[in-house]
């Protein structure tokens, strides 16, 4: 498991802190790295059509789960959205989709992703 990519996903999950109670944040944290954890621990190919498929978190969300479980799948979807912005992309059903040709291990991409999330975090925590 590539640690720097996990760190990016972990740090971007901090954007949920101003939105949820501290008790619910662990669900966002776990959801933000869950696709890669499943791949790693089940020894699946990274970014496979099951764990890195936009339909995977959307189907449980459509069932209106309790708030902690919904947050877990929202964070899972957030992870996939970040992966969608890389060359490796993600799946929608059986179709592989990518929005850019940027490598996920590109330090500039990861830095810009973190800075964007920092701005979102600051915006959410700053009172008007």
Image (tube, rainbow, N blue to C red):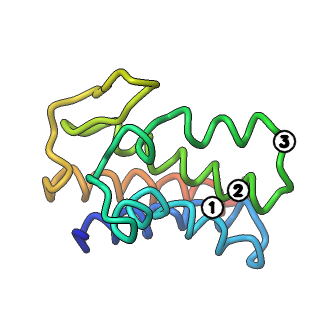
Q: Nearer the viewer, residue 105 or 112?
A: 105
Determine the residue positioned at 56% across, 69% down: 29
Q: Nearer the viewer, residue 47 or 99?
A: 47
Among the two numbered marks 3 and 1 on one chain, the one whose residue lies closer to the N terminus: 1
Determine the residue positioned at 31% across, 65% down: 43
Residue 76: percent from left, percent from top: 54, 52
Residue 27: percent from left, percent from top: 66, 68
Q: Quadrant of residue 16?
A: bottom right
Among the two numbered marks 2 and 1 on one chain, the one whose residue lies closer to the N terminus: 1
Callout 2: few (<14), some (14-19), or many (20+) C-alpha neighbours within 10 Å?
many
Determine the residue positioned at 75% across, 58% down: 69
SS at mark 3 in the image:
loop
**Residue occupied by mark 1:** 16
> How far apart, in angstroms, are the residues tagged by discs 2 and 3?
11 Å
Callout 1: few (<14), some (14-19), or many (20+) C-alpha neighbours within 10 Å?
many
Q: Which mark is residue 64?
A: 3
Among the two numbered marks 2 and 3 on one chain, the one whose residue lies closer to the N terminus: 3
Q: Nearer the viewer, mark 3 or mark 1?
A: 3
Q: Which mark is residue 38?
A: none
SS at mark 1 in the image:
helix
**Residue occupied by mark 2:** 71
Callout 3: few (<14), some (14-19), or many (20+) C-alpha neighbours within 10 Å?
few
> How far apart, in angstroms, are the residues tagged by discs 3 and 1?
19 Å
């Amino acid at each position: 498991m590539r640690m720097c990519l996990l760190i990016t996903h972990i740090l971007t999950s901090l954007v949920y802190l101003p939105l949820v109670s501290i008790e619910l944040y662990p669900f966002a944290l776990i959801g933000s790295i869950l696709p890669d954890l499943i791949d790693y621990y089940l020894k699946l190919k990274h970014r496979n059509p099951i764990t890195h498929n936009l339909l995977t978190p959307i189907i449980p969300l459509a069932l209106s789960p309790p708030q902690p479980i919904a947050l877990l799948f929202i964070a899972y979807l957030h992870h996939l959205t970040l992966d969608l912005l890389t060359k490796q992309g993600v799946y929608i059903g059986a179709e592989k989709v990518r929005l850019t040709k940027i490598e996920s291990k590109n330090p500039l991409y990861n830095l810009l992703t973190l800075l964007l999330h920092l701005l979102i975090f600051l915006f959410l925590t700053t009172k008007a």
